[in-house]
Image (tube, rainbow, N blue to C red):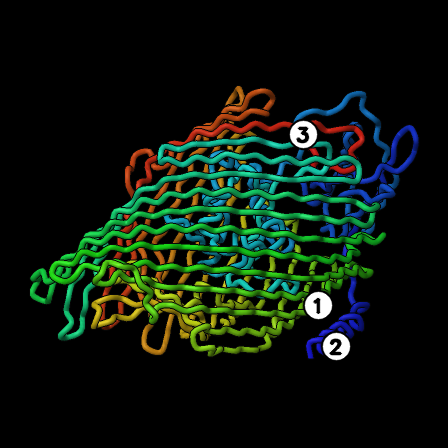
Amino acid sequence: MVKALFLLLLSCIFISAHAQRGGASVHGQVADSLSRKPVEFATIVLMQAPERRPVAQVLADGQGNFSFTGVPYGSYQVGITMLGYSPRIIDTFQVDSTHPAHQLGVRYLSKTTQQLGGVTVTAKKPMIEIKDEKLIYNVENDIDKDNSSASDIMRKVPMLTVDPDGNIKLKGQTNFKILLNGRATSMIANNPKEALKAFPAAIIKKIEVISEPSAKYEAEGIGGIINIITQKNIIGYNGNVFTNYNTLGSFTGGGSISARVRKFGISSFVSTNNSSIRSSSESGMEGLLPGNKTNLLQRTDMKDKRDNLNGSLELTYDIDSSNSITLYGGINQSKTGNEAPQDLQLFDSTGTLIKRGIYESITSRQENIYSVGLDYQLKFRKPEHELSVQFNQSGSRDNSLANNLQHNIPGTDSAYDNHNNNTSANTSVQADYNLPLPHDQKIETGVRGVFRRVESSFAQYIRNKEQEMILNPERADRYNSTQNILAAYATYRFKIGEKLSIKLGARLEHTNMQGTFGSTQSSVRSSFYNLIPSVNINKTLKGFNSLSFAYTRRIQRPWIENLNPFVNDNDPYNIVYGNPDLGPSVFDNFGLSYNLIIDKLNVNIGYDLLFSNNNITSITHYDTTRKSSVTTYDNIGKTMANGLNLSVSLPVTPKWNLSANTRISHNQYRSDTISNSGFFVSAYFMSDYTFKYDIRLSAHMYYSSGAPSLQGSSSSYLGYGLSARKDFFDKKLSLSINADQPFRPNLRFTSDTRDDAFRRTSTIVSRTNNYTISISWRFGRLQQSATRKKGIDTNY
């Protein structure tokens, strides 16, 4: 069935492929001024005249040819650069209805007499860019990158919000797909909050946000896709070494290096992070039912210790100018420990103390993650005509142990240990084919297979009267699950007139899921198809302004945390377990955005609408016997969310930059018995200024009004920070000092959960006032024999 529909869709696309018209284009060739031979892989930048604002960038092919298509009418210049040659700017030319195809002819470059040392010269890019269906945040231009984590930097990215605990939301959604260099990796997917806290921003080049992905992308991830692109260099060699330490007790260190010799390229990075964090929590839970009106107060002092080591290696070999192979791998090892002594008081309806508890919980967890893969890419003679095949294998092993001691007055003391071990393996195979057609048309097709397996075993040991730890058979089991996904997609891009571009797509996915319990040999099976349509429409307006509309359908498949029936009762009054019967959630996403460029001012305004009738939602109820809350997951959520994003970037002067990102949304949640709704506002403001002697100062502030959920809401919070940076030795060495919340020692973050039977309020108090010192060293040497270049300097 998948094959038949796929072939039918391709046939329809090919039949209609010749009925559309294209837009303006610019073509040319680069050659050596002495030998007259083509200069291959030179970097060509199309710039808006007269301010030389970069618009698009390409590499010349093996014959020195280059082209830009879909160019809006206007005045342009072209910049050409190649290592070993003097850069060149081509005089201003006009693209209009009388010159829809502008031929620049052959342009010659003169060789320089010396090698270039230091770091790659790159184009001056704005902090935020809009390209096709992507919003791009250029981390490499961020002053704070050397003393920040990926989680810190994401506060600044439009459509993303990060709460004080590091939880990330995309368009207000906690479910989205995170890619690393365009690839799914279990290093981040298994625990994105902790992984991104430990991931250094110094090695990130840019962060791409695809809020309404086309059918080309895997359908999983409600909010969309976040793609983290790390720093790479494809000529000569370069790298950096960095370290930072803050007064909260966190240390990060590492480095990256990239090198290329003729056809061989290598890129790698390694980093380590060690932290010791102290915080406290205060929670209260009130039973509201007649006969069960109790009040529970809990205070916990927490000490978290984390050690993290991660690294990656990528090897590239260019077989020839058209064929390349990339072999890559990555590891992540983490150890976490948590000590959480707790004081508990339980009162009856009259306010009389009926129970006192002194509890102690010591939790340890060790996780090992790996990922290996192989990519093959074939580029045909025509630009954008490509075939790629990808294979990836990743896996993880996660072992955790929780020791619990409970002293109850009145009552008996108890001791128990919870063991939870998880092993996962994920294999994916994908093939993609891009076919450009005349008049700026393009077809993308592909197939993908994903095969996942998760094995989970859990057991509880309790202390008996003889002070021996024995197995509790009611709390021991083994749960294995498999998830196999087969998918095929096709997209078709065409233009109507000169300024209207349309991209239509469809993706068909078949999912087969199975879960088996070891104790009873009972199993749960699920098999379903999902048709994923997508529409992307872009209208080029006057200048470089544009208006775009997008629609897509997204899927949320349950993860092991949602499916695993292991009962986590480390806190016996707040119990959590998974639901192995969960099915997928389907969401429909609509997006409308307007990108406005007025001189130096760049403004992006976006509106999005999302709704679902079977959202996977955490649901909490009150256990009147235990006097505790019990949380699990179910497909009961009906969600509708409207959101408005505003992103503004303004380089006031060459030395002073301002930027702001804000989001206002209204969310509605409803189940059969519960409903809730409310507004959510978040904002981030940043300003930086460059003084003499390579000194830069930066200030930022962020605010969140708190967000509603199905059964409650969270409180608002405000944060701010200052940083200073001094560069030395021609910007190779950087020293940064950052002050976070310098005038506020602690932050209180409150959330509440409620229904007719109970209300629970939890407040986390964490230390926020801290200072970070960072040092980074960048090194490199660019050789005349290099064949590729990734940037261009437009300041000449």
Question: Hey, what amino acid is under mark 2?
Answer: Leu
Q: CA distance from mark 3 to mark 1?
A: 42 Å
Work out whether 492 lies above or below 151.
Answer: below
* Upstream in sequence: badge 3 or badge 1: 1
Q: Are the two marked residues, 2 and 1, in contact with CB atoms closer than 8 angstroms?
A: no
Give whichever of discs 3 and 2 has the lower sequence position.
Answer: 2
The residue at the far right in this view is 35
- Check the image and name the residue furthest to the front: 466
Q: Residue at x 66, y 55 (%)?
A: 540
Q: Which residue is mark 2?
A: 8
Reading the image, the residue beneath label 3 is 795
Q: Closer to the camera, 702 or 328?
A: 328
| Picture coordinates of residue 387, whole percent (x, y) | 77, 58
Left or right position of 700 against 285:
right
Q: Position of residue 568 (x, y in %)?
A: 34, 62
* Foreground of the two, 78 or 150: 150
Q: Residues within 10 Å of mark 1 (few under 14, many from 20)?
A: many
Distance of mark 3 from mark 2, alpha carbons? 51 Å
Q: Which mark is residue 425?
A: none
Nearer the camera: disc 3 or disc 1 = 1
Q: Tag 1: residue type?
A: Ala
